[in-house]
Image (cartoon, coloured by chain):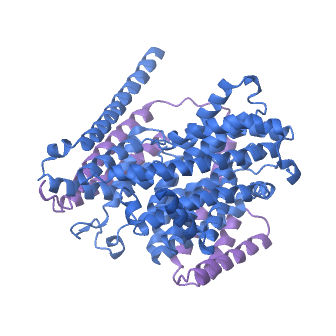
Amino acid sequence: MEYVDNLIKGFILVGAPEKLIFCFVGVFVGTIVGVLPGLGPVGAMALLFPLSLEVDPLSGIILLAGIYYGSMYGGSTTSILINVPGEATSMMTCIDGYQMSRKGRAGAALAVSAIGSLVAGTVGVAVVMFFAPWLGRAALALGPPEFFAITFCGLVVLSNVTGGSTLKAFLGVILGMMLSTVGLDVLTGSSRFTFGTLELSKGIDIVPIMMGLFGMSEIFSTVLKPYSVKDVVKVKFRDLFPRLDELKASVKPIMRGTFLGLPIGMLPCPGAFLSTIVSYKMERSLSKNPENFGKGAIEGVAGPESANNAASTTGMIPLLSLGLPFTASMTVLLGAFMVHGVNPGPLFMKQHADLYWGVIAALYIGNVMLLLLNYPLVGVFASLATVSPKIIMPIVTGMVFIGAYTVNNSVFDLWLTLVFGLVGYVMKEHLDFKMPPLIIGFILGGVLEKSLRQGLGMVDGNFLVMLQRPVTAVCMAIAAIILIFQILRFFYNKSKVSGSEGAAL
Amino acid sequence: MKRAESISSLIVILLCSIYLYSAFSLPFGTLKTPGPGLLPVILGCIGLAMSLAWFVTAFHKGKKTDISSGDAGEKGEKAEKAGVQIGKLFWFLLAIILYIVTFKFVNPFVSALVIVIVLSKICDLEGWKKPLLLGVSFSVFIYIVFVMWFNVQF
């Protein structure tokens, strides 16, 4: 009953016209972003980050969260209509979704995708609603030593969630943490790495970093390699309804996809992306007609889309209950919480109950809005994919810099955005560096330092006493095992490469 | 790409060295009362070690010879195309730098209009009507959203 009462309060909060407008704007922008190749949800969230700062915390979070799950809907539209996944998570939908549209069943594919997303998103929000508070209450028993260990373990695990070179991922985390130490020390107030400049004494804001690394780097990449726009399959409104047999065939894949995506989304990995691949493989292996997959099997659309939305939603649980972002999008959301003076984590639900239940209610409302928005306007959104990057890139560039300026009214932030944009571009295109580890290190670095120093103070400087606490010991052990495994794997791969080169000679 | 990695790793080594040098000037404190220099020193040491490892890895990879493929004509065409795109990026960057330099001296709506027009021409948007329309729409959007709605002072 307590949950129901709190949820009703959340709906009352979000039911205000202003909040509904922000929810609508968020899902609308998210859908557009999902449709457009190039600019992903993280880039769009970074772009609208400064806007979210101008409003109250609930409106700002609703806006950014709307972009996040709205982009999941939008990505599937272009996958089905033009065989171009707007987002990486919509990649599997291309396989059978586009084949369905070529057979004249684009409407059915879009309908099933939308319905599956609604069901999975709604179930996902229910799981967040019940599971996050439980996890948060369990985390209340934790102190600074535990938070240090959890954050350290999280950094080790998260540093390689996006794949790629382990050394570069860890280096990215370290560089991010170094950036977080610039400015005034939070515990003593002394200046660090400011080099006598006033701008650096305020510390480096997360907004220019995010807008530069995610927004500007993408713009530079697109200027160098513009994507080509394709013709769109036209879908009439009357074609949007699936047949009864198609609906029947979709029910079980939607259920399976939902319950598959729910736990994967809570893991420290690109859960939404992985869940779509696992779901597709599962549907094909369970199907009585696996030969239909790849030729327009509706199960190949229903399952992955549901898994994607379920995982995207439950990805918020570690953020809300532990304050740990497991994906780049969650990192942006964490940044949004923090600049509003709200720290997600175990005390979040106790100290900011209104905000928590408001966000939950907004997730429910947003899912319904997405269905109502996407279904009739699918042709309009799909045509956005035909807009040339020559038009989009200048507008997005202007938005980036105006947005970066509005945070602190500082031209220094514009320079930072440009510098990080160049750094991000070089990292992505020439060095095979992933950006999320750097951002994760930047955001969690402050938390790690504070909890380490407070924890050492609690145990009179005896680090071994810290390790005697069960949660600390377990987390540090997990981190140590992962580190040792990564080091061993690095040397094993190196010896394998040397061995094959020797054999070739 | 390997040369880019070697150069980048050298830059990171330099940055980590400067960071570590600055970190040593901060009070380290004791383990009972850790000072503001504790984590920076640890980070600087780890960062320096990792960037050295990266340099060694990149240098080692760069020593291996690349086997080039494709005929000379095809490579020449690709190189010419890459040169054009890099030229475009250069002008794009220059336009942004000038925009930032003049940001405080020029009316923000005028500078927004100009930058959008300039960038759209750099991106090869045909004609002048579309860039002008884009620029004007963007300036109006900025005014409505940021000045009228959010009361941002430029």
- Horizontal and vertical percent position of residue A491: 35, 27
- Horizontal and vertical percent position of residue A276: 61, 38
Q: Is residue B58 left or right of residue A224?
A: left
Residue at 22% of width from left, 57% of height from top? B21
- Please state which of residues A100 and B19 is positioned toward the viewer in this rendering: A100
Indicate the chain coloured purple by its letter.
B
Q: Quadrant of residue A372?
A: bottom right
- Horizontal and vertical percent position of residue A183: 31, 68
Residue at 61% of width from left, 84% of height from top? B148
Residue at 44% of width from left, 64% of height from top? A353
Q: Is residue A483 visible?
A: yes
Residue at 47% of width from left, 38% of height from top? A164
Q: Colour of chain A?
A: blue
Q: Is residue A108 left or right of residue A210?
A: right
Outermost residue, front direction?
A1
Q: Is residue A55 above or below residue A214?
A: below
Q: Is residue B76 left or right of residue A312?
A: right
- Please state which of residues A451 and A242 is positioned toward the viewer in this rendering: A242
